[in-house]
């Protein structure tokens, strides 16, 4: 973190003045405290100078910045913008979710996603990885063009599954409908061979995905009995990973069961999502391979709670939700103690969009220090994405900055009270705004 004296700040202001004369007005943030994501420490008062979407300087104390619009964030802690590595912006769980798949058009999901994206951004999440949903690449493009407000999106597009597996889009269809539509194949993200695996990845490339997502085991909310059985052969997973590497993609693997996780980690996936039945052996393997673990505790707790409500889930889903959902927080605690690389993700879309920050509280409940939980959503998340220009408040980084009242390292509940959000140097939320929090 760059710390300068008052005289150095004055020189910094003079140095910036000529360049700023013909540029957009810079912004100076007077932060009461600043979270250094590299050290995990909360530093004292700092001034952050933002220009042209980047952090131009970080100085100790509250100093005047020539020609800048100053935002007073005294009494707040500024942190790098948060990243949620597992969301589904194209939908949100409800008691009607399963029937809506037969009644709604893609455009209905697209319109809904606009509101979900805005809620996510206003909750402090300036970047997300959307792991499965055909709406996401289009939403990403609309946000990038400034048409709608939302986080920066790394979009997987359609998840890759096996026949009958989690993310087979025809699960639960009756025989007449299945006969009319025919069996889905690699274009629809369903594979049954090494060649299919390669074609499915190439199809995602054709469609403009940023990352590949596979469903290495059964899932909780799919209309199928198993929530943990392995659903890819070793060769199939390896073909996905190798083909993804050819296109510069990283691979995220949804996995609840031990064997499916082991196959995915051995094949070289970047991350394991959920990881419910992660064994000590798999944890050791992940440490050796450098595989990241994204726990998604929020989703586990959400589905476990909803499983208690008659009719919320189909009966084939309800036992899985009750059994698997309740275990994820325990697995996260064990993984942290074992030293498995971990980063932040919620599986939001299972729970309500905009509630993403509650994951921080669940991580701390699991025994993970608050500072580490914040690192998981900042500098660690950037490593999972493979980027080096975000996750830290430092000169040259993206100006993605969030501020919360008080000190979230001392009281993690402060993350639920975000009242300043900046993404790429644009202020979307500031203290006193009438724009309601999600």
Image (spheres, rainbow, N blue to C red):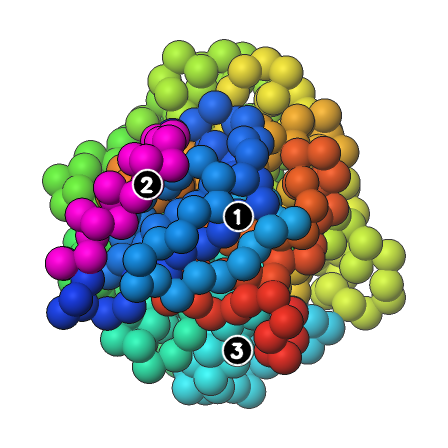
- Where are the magenta residues, as a range? 2-18
Q: CA distance from mark 3 to mark 2?
A: 41 Å
Asked if the stretch drawn in magenta spans residue 27, the answer is: no
Q: Secondary structure at mark 2?
A: helix
Lateral position of residue 212 relative to residue 177, left or right: left
Q: CA distance from mark 2 to mark 1?
A: 16 Å
Lateral position of residue 332 relative to residue 240, left or right: right
> Is residue 15 at all visible to an observer of this figure?
yes
Mark 3: few, some, or many residues within 10 Å (few <14, many ≥20)?
A: some
427, above or below 369, in the image: below
Residue that appears at 28% across and 68% down: 25
**Main secondary structure of the magenta stretch:** helix
**Residue indicated by mark 1:** 31
> Looking at the image, is mark 3 or mark 2 nearer the viewer?
2
Q: Quadrant of residue 119?
A: bottom right
In the rendered image, the quadrant that contains the N terminus is: top left
Q: Secondary structure at mark 1?
A: strand
Query: Residue 115: which disc?
Result: 3
Mark 1: few, some, or many residues within 10 Å (few <14, many ≥20)?
A: many
**Residue indicated by mark 2:** 9
Q: Which badge, 2 or 1, is on the more N-terminal residue?
A: 2
In the rendered image, the quadrant that contains the C terminus is: bottom right
Give the camera-side residue of 195 and 377. Answer: 377
- Where is residue 36 drawn, in percent x and y? 48, 32
- Where is residue 424 drawn, in percent x and y? 33, 59
Query: Residue 70: which disc?
Result: none
Q: Secondary structure at mark 3?
A: helix
Give the camera-side residue of 164 and 322. Answer: 322
> Is residue 325 at all visible to an observer of this figure?
no
Q: CA distance from mark 3 to mark 1?
A: 29 Å
Residue that appears at 18% across and 47% down: 15
């Amino acid at each position: 973190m760059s710390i300068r004296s008052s005289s150095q700040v004055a020189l910094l202001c003079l140095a910036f003045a000529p360049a700023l004369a013909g540029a957009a007005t810079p912004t100076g943030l007077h932060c009461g405290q600043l979270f250094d994501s590299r050290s995990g420490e909360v530093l004292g008062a700092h001034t952050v100078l933002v220009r042209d979407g980047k952090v131009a300087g970080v100085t100790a104390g509250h100093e005047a910045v020539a020609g800048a619009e100053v935002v007073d964030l005294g009494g707040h802690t500024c942190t790098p913008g948060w990243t949620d590595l597992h969301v589904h912006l194209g939908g949100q769980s409800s008691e009607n979710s399963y029937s809506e798949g037969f009644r709604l058009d893609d455009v209905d999901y697209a319109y809904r996603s606009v509101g979900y994206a805005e809620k996510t951004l206003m909750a402090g999440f300036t970047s997300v990885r959307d792991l499965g949903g055909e709406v996401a690449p289009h939403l990403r493009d609309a946000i990038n063009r400034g048409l709608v407000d939302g986080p920066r999106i790394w979009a997987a597009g359609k998840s890759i599954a096996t026949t009958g597996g989690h993310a087979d889009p025809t699960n639960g269809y009756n025989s007449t409908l299945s006969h009319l539509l025919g069996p889905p194949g690699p274009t629809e993200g369903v594979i049954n061979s090494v060649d299919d695996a390669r074609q499915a990845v190439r199809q995602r490339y054709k469609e403009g995905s940023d990352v590949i997502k596979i469903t290495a085991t059964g899932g909780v909310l799919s209309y199928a009995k198993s929530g943990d059985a392995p659903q890819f052969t070793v060769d199939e997973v390896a073909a996905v990973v190798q083909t993804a590497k050819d296109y510069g993609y990283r691979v995220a693997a949804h996995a609840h069961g031990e064997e499916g996780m082991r196959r995915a980690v051995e094949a070289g996936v970047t991350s394991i999502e959920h990881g419910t039945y992660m064994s000590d052996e798999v944890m050791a393997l992940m440490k050796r391979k450098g595989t990241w673990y994204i726990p998604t505790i929020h989703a586990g707790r959400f589905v476990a709670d909803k499983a208690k409500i008659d009719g919320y889930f189909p009966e084939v889903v309800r036992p899985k939700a009750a059994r698997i959902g309740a275990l994820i927080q325990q697995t996260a605690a064990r993984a942290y103690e074992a030293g498995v690389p971990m980063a932040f993700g919620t599986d939001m879309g299972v729970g309500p969009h905009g509630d993403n920050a509650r994951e921080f509280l669940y991580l701390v409940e699991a025994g993970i220090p608050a500072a580490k939980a914040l690192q998981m959503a900042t500098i660690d998340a950037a490593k999972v994405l493979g980027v080096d220009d975000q996750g830290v408040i430092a000169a040259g980084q993206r100006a993605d900055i969030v501020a919360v009242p008080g000190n979230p390292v001392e009281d993690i509940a402060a993350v639920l009270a975000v009242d300043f959000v900046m993404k790429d140097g644009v202020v979307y939320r500031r203290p006193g705004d009438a724009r309601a929090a999600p």
